[in-house]
Image: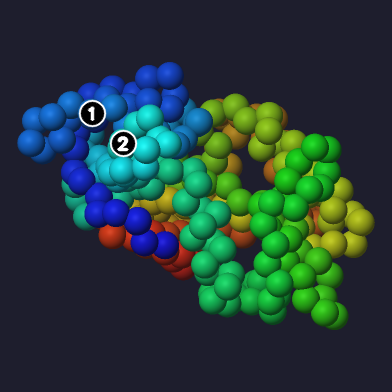
Amino acid sequence: MRFQTPLAPARLIRRYKRFLADCRLEDGREVTAHCANPGSMLGLAEPGTKIWLEPNDDPKKKLKWGWRLVDHENGHFTGVDTSVPNRALKAALEAGEVPELAAYRTIRPEVKYGRNSRIDFLLQQDGLPDAWVEVKSVTLSRQPGLAEFPDSVTARGAKHLGELAEMAQSGHRAVMFYLVQRTDCATFTIARDLDPAYGVAFDKARQMGVEMLCYGTRITPDDITLGPGLCL
């Protein structure tokens, strides 16, 4: 998934009201960027952090910049836009790049299911059970090489696990797909200390037949693409 317009480097001044970030461009200008991430962004929003912003000239958008990446200045990046995983995974599914799901040819996004929910992707193929795929963006890392989810309490995330478990019990394939938007992690785990209830829901869903997949990403200021599978 390529960024629509070339990204510009900047320094974070502050993130506030969850969806806003004041930033300083390299030419000294201060701008406010949209932060498409409702999570805590633990460890990613320290003032002075090098970041990458995407400009836009859409007259319908109030903010003319979007925060897309954290640059760790050691060759590694983290993607902070939570809409990216769905777009990156859709492209990978269409290209048959996820071996566990490569047999499916029909890919339907945002299909209603569960209790007033929409599944990220419903995959269908003649002769195969429907596969219901929920995608989560993973950005937390508190230990070198280890990615964690969630980065804060997420009752909504636990609800999704419960709904997937119900689909699995009904004879469908149910898949929780964790996409790690970091290039510095090789393994993944649940952050049970940050949200014990989510950890319980994860274990229960797995026992009820929900498949847990985790993949990394390849990230540059030009694009974000699906990376290799990670140990879970």
Residue 215's place in the image compared with 114, above or below, is below
Residue at the location (77% across, 70% down)?
124
Three-letter code for the amino acid on which mark 2 is drawn: Lys
x, y percentage for residue 106?
Answer: 71, 72
Residue at the location (67% across, 57% down)?
109
Residue 2's place in the image compared with 39, above or below, is below
- Give the CA separation, mark 1 to mark 2: 9 Å
Describe the colour scheme in one phrase. rainbow
Residue at the location (60% across, 34% down)?
192
Closer to the camera, 92 or 217? Answer: 92
- The circle on residue 31 is 1
* Residue 231 shows up from this direction: no
Residue 107's place in the image compared with 194, above or below, is below
- The circle on residue 64 is 2
x, y percentage for residue 144?
Answer: 35, 46
x, y percentage for residue 52?
Answer: 26, 44
Three-letter code for the amino acid on which mark 1 is drawn: Val
- The N terminus, quarter of image: bottom left
